[in-house]
Amino acid sequence: MIRINRKKSIPVIVCLLILLLSLPRTAYAAEPYKSYTYTARMQGVPSLNGFIPEDVYVGADLGTTALNAPKDLDFDPEGNLYIVDTGNSRILKLNENLELIAVIDSFNNGGQKDTFNQPEGMFITKEGNIYVADTQNGRILKFDSEFNLVRVLDKPDYRGLSTTEDYKPQKVAVDDSERIFVVAFGAIEGLIQIGQDGEFIRFFGSNVVKPNFFELALRKILTKEQREKRMIFLPTEYSNVIVDNAGFLMTTTLNVMDDAIKRLNSKGDNIMRHDGRTGNSYGEVTTEWTETKPQFVDLAVDKDDNVLGLDRTSCRVYVYNSFGDLLFQFGGRGLGKGLFQSPSALEIKDNKVYVLDDRNNDLTVFKASEFGEKVLLANRLYIDGSYEESLEPWQDVIKMNSNYDLAYKGIGKALFKMGRYKEAMKNFKLAYAYRDYSKAMGEYRTQIMREHFPLIVAVIVLVIIAVRVLFWWLHKKGIYIKEIIEGYNFRRKGESK
């Protein structure tokens, strides 16, 4: 039997408690989710979280009754937040401290009281005009900043260009020219563009049908009857639309692996940059074939043109810079703080991200972590052309997370712009950025040639002079290079013997 001396063990226990309490909280505090980045081989490696959950709000925290399947949110020019509480057929207006200002569940329509019927989307212009996609009523409503009704836009006349009978607008966006673009249920022809009077203009930016390799291979071996029974390839409808800082439309599409996020020009063509490692693939990227596809339901663009995409499949938010590089992702599926069951909408303001969950019926607010702030700062300085200033925050990022390849790439690009090509090559090599490495090597060679051109010319001249002198000396001695090479001189010596 082992006996414990209680008198001697008490000081030991006290010392252990003091040591435990003195440890940093992050040493034992469990993170709600794990972040990662991709290697050159598209393998995930652990990374620090760029955003961390600050707080979660339910209806009572916002000064009202419980939320019911909220589908959208937006900020007005004064910084007030609006939540489209779809299941309750109302819109909540909150101030910047998320304190309730008003509940809008009815409005005056030509002297008569009118109400929403499960609205799913809204858009607020720079002037403060508010557009609401009143989904089950089949209309778009335009209000002024005080929620006075300005115009009712009912179902447009498609002029025979669509077979869709029901009109259920789910999302709406208005560009700087006040052109209205609508995402409607079942509208596979593209975004519905209408004028301010509600007149149909055109279908805009239809998704291109892209059958996958496995489906095409399978169809090669199926009979005609079997092929007819399989799925017909139809364009995929959009799930959301917004307007970015430059006035371009940006969209999300469900159940596609490539081009799930688009930036559309005036012709409806995708002009999204894909310079990043993941190319035109968004969300969870894998080299293995899988039936599971991302379902991007919303996106937002911050003041630095970073794009945030909300994926309902992984329940994560993915953050990309304007070049298409994945900066970080956060969130996940679950019930804890910072996790989701069915994320439905997001917005970003002042480095805080607001995410709605239509199953948990709550609003989660995320703030940038110290690591995230460093990455965002370095990325902003580089994009703004402040290359020298971006070096220090990129170096700080490396100190915090040596697995973060994008920091090496950022340092390499900054050094490249500063003309320090040899150092840039070193960092591009660490980042496995082979294309950038080749460009830096080409510039480095040119730089070497330019810096040492007089020396190179002098060496060439000396070599030419030395060769001429050598030939003169050999000729004087009766030695001819041509005869030596062809072997004539050796044959003559052999014959004399």
Image: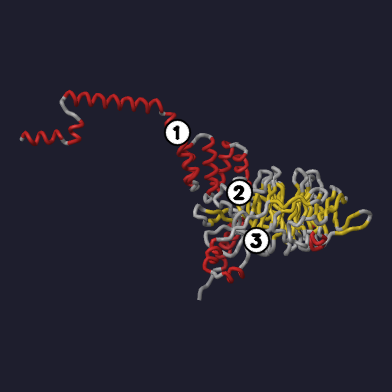
Q: CA distance from mark 3 to mark 2?
A: 43 Å
Q: Pinpoint residue 35: horizontal percent, then vertical percent.
A: 59, 56
What's the amino acid at mark 3? Leu
Query: In the image, what residue type sits under mark 2?
Result: Phe
Q: Which badge, 3 or 2, is on the more N-terminal residue?
A: 3
**Pointer 3 and pointer 1: residues touching (CB < 8 Å)?**
no
Give the label, 3 or 2, closer to the camera.
3
Left or right, 248 with reference to 138 = left
Which of 109/404 is in front?
A: 109
Can the viewer see residue 304? yes
Picture residue at 53% right of the left edge, 40% below the top = 413
Residue under the point 48% across and 39% down: 440
Separation of residues labelled 1 and 2 (CA atoms): 37 Å
Q: Residues within 10 Å of mark 1 (few under 14, many from 20)?
A: few
Tell me the element at label 1: helix
Extreme residue toward the right, this view: 111
Tally the marks. Answer: 3
Q: Of the residues shown, which amino acid type is indicated by label 1? A: Thr
- Which label is found at residue 371? 2
Along the line of sight, the residue nearer the viewer: 496 or 283:
496
For residue 360, the mark is none
User: Which residue: 51% across, 53% down?
Assistant: 39
Q: Which of the two discs, 3 and 1, labels the residue nearer the N terminus?
A: 3
Which numbered disc flags the more N-terminal residue, 1 or 2? 2
Q: Residue furthest left?
A: 497
Which is in the foreground here, disc 3 or disc 1? 3
Which residue is identified by label 3?
A: 234
